[in-house]
Image (cartoon, helix red, strand yellow):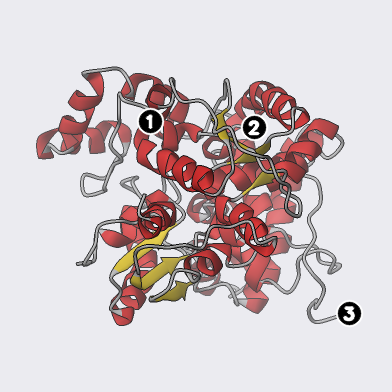
Amino acid sequence: MREGSLEAPTRHPLGWQDESFYDEGALYEELERVFDICHGCRRCVSLCDAYPTLFDLVDESTTFEVDGVDKQDYWKVVEQCFMCDLCYQTKCPYVPPHEWAVDFPHLMLRAKAVQFRKGERKLSHKLLSNTKLQGKVGSIPVVAQVINKANSNKTVRKILEKTLDLDHRAHLPEFHSDTLRRRDKTRSPAAVEIREAGPTRGKAALFATCYCNVNTPDIGQDLIRVFEHNGIPVRLTEKEECCGMPKLEQGDLATVDKYRKTNIPELVRLIDEGWDIVAAIPSCVLMFKQELPLMYPDDADIQKVKQHIFDPFEYLLHRHKADLLNIEFKTELGKVAWHVPCHQRVQNIGPKTKDVLALVPGTEISMIERCSGHDGTYGVRAGTYEKSQKIARAVVNRVKKTEADYLVSDCPMAATQIADKLDLRYGETNPLTLLRKAYGL
């Protein structure tokens, strides 16, 4: 028996379409098996609150072992996992191909899927994860302004805390009626010579995502300007649904499947026309690179999308390696604290954002590889807001120590969560915005 594995982690297909996936008895057996392994190891205690919750349950049990924990208390652990995947990718020595085959995040996903099928996931969680509905309502002219004003009203926020489980202290994203799609309606891709570089084919279709379309359209525009400044024509997909990550994290796999049926054919059509796919939100890229391929391991179209979707800075660095990146920068950036989002780290692409920003003269990058604790809904829900803030504290303290001029994160939600506790010299918090500034665009 090997104590741990030195081999690269590999993942097994999710198996969610098999009825045994939802067998509650088998689920409890697997939870007990994995929890017992985690109890004997405890390397992940600093990552999120799922592990301290588990270890406290064990330490307070009559047997001081997992068998002394009431199985109904297992759900307390499940509730604290927001599937950042860091335990799997960076800490656990027992992931496949080790014979114990521990995949903690996907076990938590299975548990949430069982809960969801039984109707036990909270209605408020379902609503908060419905980014499609939020975007549809929040992008209506006048309505967007009303929502934004209401979200800054203390009385309204107290009501939302009681009705929707939204902590009244949590920072909520703004909604824009002038969405990215509306702003981009009259623009055509730049007419330039298309040049391949490594796996990139030289023209990119932007999967705008719910967040970039309605909540942060400026980031989408920054991506377009930076790419076209580098001779890469950009267009938006003609149609898209949510990538599915918010619903995946709630165990709502049927809705993930529904979104797939719209997204994958459109992305495959674009790929077959010679376009690469990019998305400015790491969770969306990860959904197509990892989660959907594990849900549908035999689907050739999904595997095709996996091979042709890129993180924006991953894409740009491929261009740089082929001497196709414009490195004529006009503005120095000074000290930059770069927070690495969990869902970017687990793509296994390396610190591409850091590598590109470091090309800007007069720029010093401090890389911070700790979770911000936000995870979309975890950071705003009344039951988890305090824990989310506690997780973020380590990142905030590290940024303070760097005395940075900028704090950026490829995840805009993580950036906001961290920046709220800082007094920064400049307000830009997205690396694409910073790169556009460096170019003087």
Badge 2 vs badge 1, beta-carbon distance below 8 Å: no
Circle on res. 1: 3
Q: Is residue 16 above or below residue 93?
A: above
Q: Residues within 10 Å of mark 3 (few under 14, many from 20)?
A: few
x, y percentage for residue 185? 44, 21
Name the foreground residue: 275 vs 160.
Answer: 275
Q: CA distance from mark 2 to mark 1?
A: 24 Å
Dot 2 corresponds to which residue? 253
Name the residue located 31 percent from the left edge and 33 percent from the top edge.
164
The kind of secondary structure element at disc 2 is: helix
Name the residue located 69 percent from the left edge and 34 percent from the top edge.
275
Left or right, 97 with respect to 49, comes to right
Q: CA distance from mark 1 to mark 3?
A: 52 Å
The kind of secondary structure element at disc 3 is: loop
Amino acid of disc 2 = Leu
Q: Is residue 169 above or below residue 19?
A: below
Amino acid of disc 1 = Val
x, y percentage for residue 232? 59, 43
Amino acid of disc 3 = Met
Dot 1 corresponds to which residue? 214
Name the residue located 20 percent from the left edge and 26 percent from the top edge.
145
Task: Classify residue 439 by image quadrant.
Answer: bottom left
The kind of secondary structure element at disc 1 is: helix
Q: CA distance from mark 2 to mark 3?
A: 36 Å
